[in-house]
Image (tube, rainbow, N blue to C red):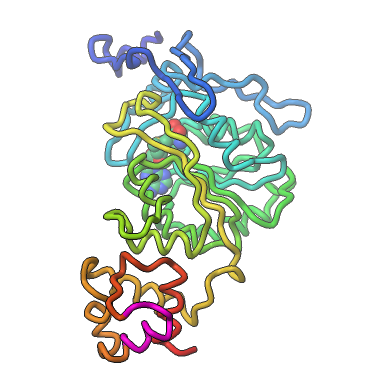
Amino acid sequence: MPSMLHTLLPLSSTPKPPANSPVYDGPFAVHSTRPKSLHTVAAVSKTTSETRINNKAEDDYHATLKALNSKGRFPRKSLGQHYMLNSEVNDQLVAAADVQEGDLVVEIGPGTGSLTNVLVNSGATVLAIEKDPYMAALVTERFSSLDCVKVLQEDFTKCHIRSHLSTVLQSGMNSSGVKTKYAKVVSNLPFNISTEVIKQLLPMGDIFSEVVLLLQEEAAVRMVDSSLRSSEYRPINIFINFYSDPEYKFKVPRTNFFPQPKVDAAVVSFRLKQPVDYPPVSSAKSFFSMVNCAFNGKRKMLRKTLQHICSSFEIEEALASAGLPSTSRPEELALNDFVRLHNSIVKP
Ligand SMILES: C[S@@+](CC[C@H](N)C(=O)[O-])C[C@H]1O[C@@H](n2cnc3c(N)ncnc32)[C@H](O)[C@@H]1O
């Protein structure tokens, strides 16, 4: 190991790869890909087409440590820094988004660039947005010779993704050949910003076709499963189904990350609906404000929880004209029921 690594992570405190890991037990095969040797981050060089990375880089445990040490960094909990050690998982993430030559892909939190590398090798043009200035510098250096990767050092939850995308489409970066009208998002992002990111991205069906995210497993299950009357049924399920068709792809055990998080992860794809396909409501804002009100008392009847929108008599009338019992509770209503109820209360 390089002396730099010893300086920053003394042997006694150097984290060890977890026993028998990383193990990816996705839907396909179970692999044991224990770290093999010490690799540098990515050997980046120009190919004949000048857009690809020559040799498939090894983004394993040692490479990740070495990359972090090159910037004098330890993983930061506050930034949700759990780096992916298993390139098979990155391959499957990219496959889940069906990334093709000419796709424009937004990656949130590229970290050391292991997923970025797989995206580039699939022929994508990548706009990577990284909050940590050290990791942004690292990933910028790693892909500095490629026109098809642009790294922005920004907090994704605060950035104006629309204007960044249009800048990319108008810039020289597009000479690397973005062929589609819609971009995709593929990301292993910090668990603590995932709900915010989902709320930010799903209503953008006019610019994104697909959002594929590595999420905390429990959250992934909750977001995809919108079974009525379950204790997990929430306004976020209505929101997700309003704007997208979600699909649980596969589980990723915690042993695949460095450092290991306390929970497992899972990949979810959200196929975004185009605005013309959204359920017909006069205003999405008033629709979601009604849904949120309805869930204020999850076990209470809607004629009670919606009382500050209109009188309980009017609510009962609206329920009847939406074909719903007057005793309905929010957990009993699917997306379409809420749409009919909203349209009965707020006449278009
Ligand atoms: C879970 S790590 C994943 C890193 C890398 N994608 C991988 O697979 O190894 C999350 C990354 O997101 C970055 N990050 C944290 N908060 C962010 C934010 N608000 N906006 C953009 N990047 C963020 C972290 O610095 C870190 O690099």
Q: Is residue 203 left or right of residue 195?
A: right
Q: Is residue 320 magenta?
A: yes
Residue 183, position as x, y percentages in the image: 62, 52
**157 relative to 102, above or below:** below
- Magenta portion: prevailing SS class: helix
Camera-side residue of 107 and 43? 107
Camera-side residue of 99 and 331? 331
Can you see residue 347?
A: yes
| Residue at left offset 38%, top offset 55% | 227
Residue 258, position as x, y percentages in the image: 36, 25
Camera-side residue of 31 and 2? 31
Camera-side residue of 262 and 312? 312
**75 relative to 219, above or below:** above
| Residue at left offset 53%, top offset 76% | 280
Residue stretch in magenta: 315-325
Can you see residue 133?
A: no
| Residue at left offset 43%, top offset 28% | 84
Residue 50, position as x, y percentages in the image: 73, 31
Quadrant position of residue 286: bottom left
Quadrant position of residue 295: bottom left
**Ligand 1: image quarter:** top left
